[in-house]
Amino acid sequence: MASRYDRAITVFSPDGHLFQVEYAQEAVKKGSTAVGIRGTDIVVLGVEKKSVAKLQDERTVRKICALDDHVCMAFAGLTADARVVINRARVECQSHKLTVEDPVTVEYITRFIATLKQRYTQSNGRRPFGISALIVGFDDDGIPRLYQTDPSGTYHAWKANAIGRSAKTVREFLEKNYTEDAIANDNEAIKLAIRALLEVVQSGGKNIELAIIRRNQPLKMFSAKEIELQVTEIEKEKEEAEKKKSKKTT
Amino acid sequence: MAATFFGEVVKAPCRAGTEDQEEEEEGRRETAEDREVRRQLARKREVRLFRRQTKTSLEVSLLEKYPCSKFIIAIGNNAVAFLSSFVMNSGAWEEVGCAKLWNEWCRTTDTTHLSPAKSFCMFYHLKSNPSVVLCQCNCYVAEDQQYQWLEKVFGSCPKKNMQVMILTCRHVTDYKTSESTSSLHSPFLKALKTQNFKEPPCCPLLEQPNIVHDLPAAVLSYCQVWKIPAVLYLCYTDVMKLDLITVEAFRPILSSRSLKGLVKNIPQSTEILKKLMTTNEIQSNIYT
């Protein structure tokens, strides 16, 4: 049945599906996991680093990109599509600043990206963008924001979310562990993001990349050492928790 | 023969297709060249079973030459990776044969120099217990070759006192369910067994209307017909290439009776699996 309705993007199937959009969502699942957490005074983006070929320059393989000084995004899916979307978003951020003399709000740039994506689900001859994005940042009012967009052009605000491969596992972990205590301070929010990623990243801290934005501060990318430190702390805490558990049972 | 209104006699077309058929088929008759092409194609697609070291072909079927009580078959790269890291690392395995075949899905047209990983089915038995035979099949066995494969491996009269376990993967989009597909937790395992397999399987059974395809289906049907206890573990995954999470989805099988005693050193297995992943990773920059 699907084969008759998935050739052209502009065709609905009899039961209301836009198959190309649904297939684009499958393309997103082929990208590695990205997780976003909205804390009280911090927003955190964590991604599973893709393994880089020996001769490849690591700096050119980035999943976390700044759109402006106060907004950044992580994506999962087709690399080339992401590059196009990011470029358009960056231009829009500057254009907005020049026109209205104010930096974009996180919601504005998310809406811009989502509208761009939706346009590509409605014109013939074009396929949808095969990426989902997590957009984080602080608005002028000092409130932290996290939004997620998907290939269909929808966007929603989230307290914490994950995209890409094994996103479901990470989301379930977040649903269980995202509590007021867990985001009580900045360090706890960072640890929560790393713990969520460690659920699905096999080789531990080496394959994790982390970025944070604090209120009125620019984007900060964590170095491998800093991530390793956090991972060691998390492992220690895990061991202690397990010891306590086994003591309780005996 | 029929008479028209004007009295002329005409040949009526005969739907039974008796006398006229010979004349019509003259145009469609096979030439010698057609026959030769067909013969060559059949020879090219023949499934050959032989001992890799000596390169001599096996005169009898593999399981007649190496009778076994346990036969474990892994079909597809994820199932093969699972057996390689969890079963084959604990114990010394000796190669007893391989099945060489070619079809249109093979990436090379040269039938004499097929690479082992891509177009062979490798057969091993445990040195310490030769009644355990393992098969690793990474190639695609076409429909017309499946019967040949079964005959060359099982023979025409297989013994019923063996137990067969088949491991394979399928893309989750082939899984039919009334639930929403976004709620599916892939990868997940489903089982299908023959009537004579009495043990409880390690995961839920495959529900209707889902069906099994290709070589795993052929082997399972064969076992059902010959009343051999057999179970198929099918992993539905959204990543068909070699993937750690998909391979790990086969873990519940480690507790089955068929694999009892064959699986040791599980932490070591995880390390071997990780190494397999890194060496096999194709550097594709399409998805990030």
Image: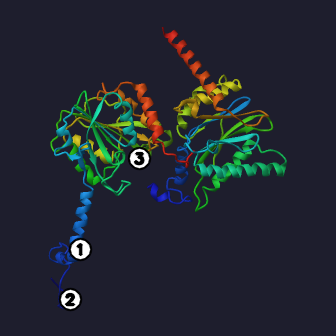
Q: In which quarter of the image is residue A167?
A: top right
* Residue identifier under label 3: B174
Q: How far apart are marks 3 and 1 (CA)?
A: 40 Å
Give the answer, above or below, for where B254 lies relative to B13. above
- Which callout, 1 or 2, points to the residue nearer the camera? 1
Residue A107 marker: none
Q: Do the residues under discs 3 and 2 have CB atoms within 8 angstroms?
A: no
Question: Where residue A92 appears, x then y in whole percent?
Answer: 75, 51
Residue nearest the observer in this picture, A63 or B43: B43
Coordinates of residue B210 in the picture (x, y in percent): 36, 44
Mark 1 = which residue? Answer: B28
Is residue A154 shown to the viewer in this render? yes
Reading the image, the residue beneath label 2 is B5
Is B94 on the left or on the right of A241, as rendered? left
Amino acid found under the numbered disc labelled 3: Asp
Q: Earlier in the sequence, mark 1 or mark 2?
A: 2
Task: Identify the chain of the residue marked 1, using the numbered disc in the image.
Answer: B
| N-terminal-most mark, 3 or 2 | 2
* Chain for numbered disc 2: B
1 and 2 marks on the same chain: yes
Q: Answer yes or no: is residue B243 visible.
A: no
The residue that appears at 59% across and 54% down in the rendered structure is A128
Q: Distance between the residues labelled 3 and 2?
A: 60 Å
- Amino acid bearing label 2: Phe
Residue at screen point 35% across, 34% down = B83
> Mark 3 falls within which chain?
B
Residue A51 sits above or below residue B11 on the image? above
Separation of residues labelled 1 and 2 (CA atoms): 35 Å
Report the amino acid beneath label 1.
Answer: Arg
Quadrant for the C terminus of chain B in the image = top right
Mark 3 and mark 1, same subunit?
yes
Mark 1 lies on a secondary structure that is: helix
